[in-house]
Image (cartoon, helix red, strand yellow):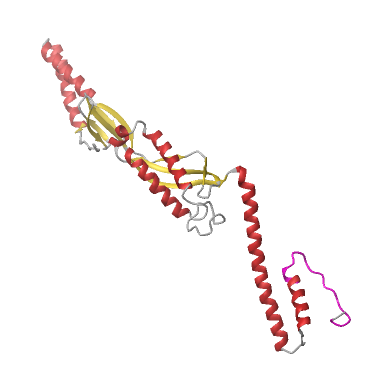
Amino acid sequence: MKTEKVLIPFNGYLVAVVLLFSIGTTIYGFITNYLVLAVASLLLSILLIKGFVVIGPNSSKVLLLFGDYRGSIKQSGLFWINPFYNKTSLSLRARNFESEKIKVNDKMGNPILISVILVWKVNDTFKSTFEVDNYEAFIRIQTDSAVRKLAGSFPYDHFEDERATITLSTNFDDVNIALENEVTQRLEIAGIEVIESRIAYLAYAPEIAHSMLRRQQASAVVAARHKIVEGAVGMVDSALKLLADKEIIEFDEDKKATMVSNLMVVLCGDSETKPVINTGTLNQ
């Protein structure tokens, strides 16, 4: 398989001096009726003019001679090349590509919506021109394919797979690295250099988004309740020990149970508690 060959063209300014001399010779030949010299100089001037090429910064020209690849020019400036070369222009600038939001299934089979942003540029002009039919369309299709494979490799979050070390919604750096590696491998055949690849949008598909939100909210409530109960038990234990150490009151098992029950209700309840004053004994 052929690879890119960087061509060093002639300096265009030196050829421009030769062109001026040729034009002057043409004029002199017509004035002096030396037609052979005039025609020869005119043909030479036409060939010289057709060979000039101007290349801007971060641009390139791919050159073919009767279907044979001769090389690529990546320098910027004014140059002169064989006028019979067929020239194809390619931009070497970095470009952005944002994929459409596509619906795919994650590792656990849940439908999700995902899109990515790809920063890329042409690195090998030969591969971009001749190894694929249309490298921009090739980038779009292969990026979508890489996104589908990535989404199927990881769960959306830890709710579905608690043992997962990497999830799409939490481990952004790891997921973006995996995405970049996948896209780089797919675009290498087209001579494309992937500068950056990252997830731009990620969410559950609309048909399950509400259910997943309720599940997350329920999990958050359970976690909060667990924390509240854990703290309340510690506070009750501290209160009982402090009362016993200071010998403020002596509790039997029934009184301890009653006090623990009351304190747990106060500490774990959702609504604000209202005190009740007992003017009798503790058993009343």
Figure check: 31 above or below 61:
above
> In the picture, residue 232 is in which quadrant?
bottom right
Up/down of 76 relative to 249, above or below: above
Q: Position of residue 141 (x, y in %)?
A: 42, 36
Identified at 70% across, 84% down, the residue is: 242
Q: Nearer the viewer, residue 189 or 48?
A: 189
- Which residue range is magenta in the image? 266-282
For the C terminus, which image quadrant? bottom right
Q: Is residue 38 left or right of residue 248?
A: left
For the image, the number of numbered tags is: 0
Q: Is residue 191 in sight in this rendering?
A: no
Residue 45 in the image: x percent, y percent?
A: 19, 20
Q: Does 276 lie within the magenta span? A: yes
Q: Position of residue 55 (x, y in %)?
A: 29, 33
39 sits left or right of 137 in the view: left
Per the picture, the main secondary structure of the magenta-coloured stretch is: loop
Q: Residue at x 66, y 76 (%)?
A: 234
